[in-house]
Image: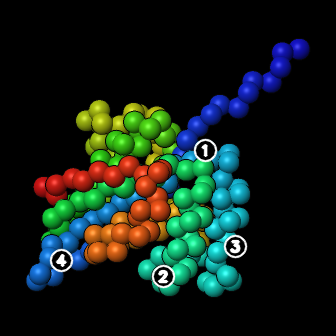
Amino acid sequence: MPCDSPPVFSLSAWVDESVIVDRGDRFGTYTMAAAIADPMDCADIRRQLRDLTMGRNGRLHWAHESAKHRDAIAATIAAADLALVVVIGAPMYGPKQERARRCCLERLLYELAQCGVSEVWMESRSAAPDRRDVRLVDSARRKGLLPAELKVGFGRPQDEPMLWIPDAVAGAATAARLGEPRWLLVFSEILSQHEVDVR
């Protein structure tokens, strides 16, 4: 009787974003971040992230964390078996936010495909914006920028702690743009960063 086939190795990515809104003295930026991991090896990462919630609201959210707690979150992420990808779109002005998202998402998905990712989970924004993202994915496939087999779906951070990671990484990238690079530097060994012009 033949042996069972070994499990096929695969990579998944979880994606979230952070925005700096433009104002009189500076233009805005749109940042998208992804955390890449073997989906079969995420149970311990999820447990460590849940341990950091300290029972508050059941999830981590970078924008609501103290600087000290951000230090602990960043250290936990940096120690995990992950790769991180950040794409920053600029300059972004108020009316161009969705355009900036499209530019960043197209580049991010391309980079994830180059890394061998086969499944991408994005934080769901709501039905209509999710449909816009699906249309962009379909367009990128038609252009040959993405492999046909790359799967893209949507998740909720209340249900999936892996989505807390790109939230933190995008937040750290935004903090660095605003003059506080300490958390982004923690990720330097596992992070690749790309910039795109918002057309």
Give residue 11's position: percent from left, percent from top. Answer: 55, 41
**Mark 4: few, some, or many residues within 10 Å (few <14, many ≥20)?**
some
Furthest residue toward top: 1
- Please report the residue visible at 55 percent of the width from the left and 79 percent of the height from the top: 69
Is the C-beta separation of discs 3 and 1 under 8 Å?
Answer: no
Q: Is residue 120 left or right of residue 171?
A: right
N-term mark: 4 or 1: 4
Nearer-the-camera pick, 77 or 198: 77
The part of the image, by quadrant, that contains residue 80 is: bottom right
- Amino acid at the residue labelled 2: Ala
| Residue at left offset 52%, top offset 67% | 74
* Nearest to N terminus: mark 3 or mark 1: 1
Amino acid beneath label 1: Asp
Is residue 41 shown above or below 181? above
Residue 38 is labelled as: 1
Q: Earlier in the sequence, mark 2 or mark 4?
A: 4
Mark 4 element type: loop
Circle on res. 22: 4
What residue does disc 2 label? 67
Residue designated by label 3? 51
Task: Report which quarter residue 100 is drawn in.
Answer: bottom left
Quick one: label 2 or label 1, which is nearer the N terminus? 1
Q: CA distance from mark 3 to mark 2?
A: 17 Å
Q: Nearer the viewer, mark 2 or mark 4?
A: 2
Earlier-in-chain disc, 3 versus 2: 3
Q: Earlier in the sequence, mark 3 or mark 4?
A: 4
70 is higher (above) or lower (below) than 35: below
Where's residue 30, x and y in %?
27, 65
Q: Nearer the viewer, mark 2 or mark 1?
A: 2
Point out the image quarter for the C terminus: bottom left
Pick the residue in front: 25 or 137: 25
